Amino acid sequence: MVEELLTVAVAAGAAGAVYVAAAARVVKQYERGVVLRLGRLRGAVRPPGLTLIVPFVDRLHKVNLQIVTMPVPAQEGITRDNVTVRVDAVVYFKVVDAAAAIINVEDYRFAVSQMAQTSLRSIIGKSDLDDLLSNREKLNQGLELMIDSPAIGWGVQIDRVEIKDVSLPDAMKRSMARQAEADRERRARIINADAELQASRKLAEAAQQMADTPAALQLRLLQTVVAVAAEKNSTLVLPFPVELLRFLEKAQEQPRPGELTPRRE
């Protein structure tokens, strides 16, 4: 009798161990468990840790809640200003509702990928080339809104979207290079012209100042002589003021004291 009880107890214990082994599931910290009992959603989402299900009746689906980095394949399109470009992007998203991610959509990763590609092609057609090259922040926000709107019903939240690269045709690259070169040359000419204008104004002010003060011209002459002499040249070129020549001519034309001015007949 005792042996039969022991046998039954051992058999029950073994059956219990097999049942627990078949029913026990481990949900990781970054996961949530969704239980379907005979095809129907059963109870709330299972939290991380050890959880039990009914073997052969319940089915546990584990959903990862980590942020997923999904590259969007390069999409070719024509911008609003009729330029053919290829644009690729990166989508960062995560699951916020595990039950909706399992029930409402067949494969939420594939759905997000297809929606991202479609939205990217739509953004290319609505934007100009200059916006794609220099105003990416605004385009990223618009692309994020376009993807996030349907993704809310899938239990997915779009964290951010970034346009990674914009590929242009070689002919367009050469045209943009010529345009940038011409623009830089234009700015260089404007800067040189502005410098000449400022220099001419300063020279005019200096000439006016020297005309009002003749001694300033003599000081400038001495400074020029000192600057030339510092070069240790064998030949020294000494500027001679034209005003001094005119003064000597006038002094030569004036009659000396005691001389009679010749009278012209």
Image: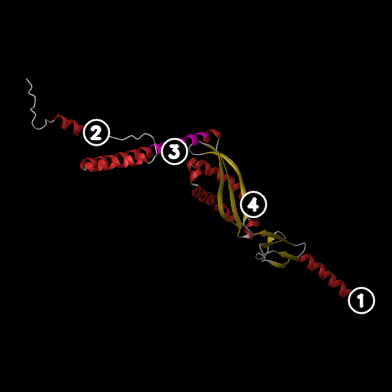
Mark 3 and mark 1: Cα distance apart in space: 100 Å
Under mark 3, the amino acid is: Arg
For the residue pair 77 and 250, the one nearer the viewer reads as 250
Q: Is residue 34 left or right of residue 123?
A: right
Q: Nearer the viewer, mark 3 or mark 1?
A: 3
Q: Which residue carries the number 1 mark? A: 4
Residue type highlighted by circle 1 = Glu
Q: Give the extent of the magenta segment.
A: 174-189
> In the rendered image, which quarter contains the C terminus?
top left
The secondary structure type at the circle numbered 1 is: helix
Q: Give the image location of residue 113, x and y in percent.
A: 62, 48
125 to 250, vertically: above or below:
below
- Which residue is nearer to you in this view: 179 or 135? 179
Residue 201 seen anywhere in this rendered image of the structure? no
Residue 109's disc is: 4
Q: Which residue is mark 3?
A: 184
Is 247 placed above or below 3 here? above
Lower sequence index among marks 3 and 2: 3
Q: Which residue is mark 2?
A: 242
Q: Earlier in the sequence, mark 3 or mark 1?
A: 1
Which residue lies at the image location 19% right of the left edge and 32% below the top edge?
Answer: 248
Viewer-side residue, 204 vs 109:
204
- Give the class, few, some or many, for how many residues have Cα within 10 Å of label 2's Cα (few <14, many ≥20): few
Q: Amino acid at mark 4?
A: Arg
Residue at 51% from the left image edge and 51% from the top image edge:
141
Left or right: where 8 falls relative to 52: right
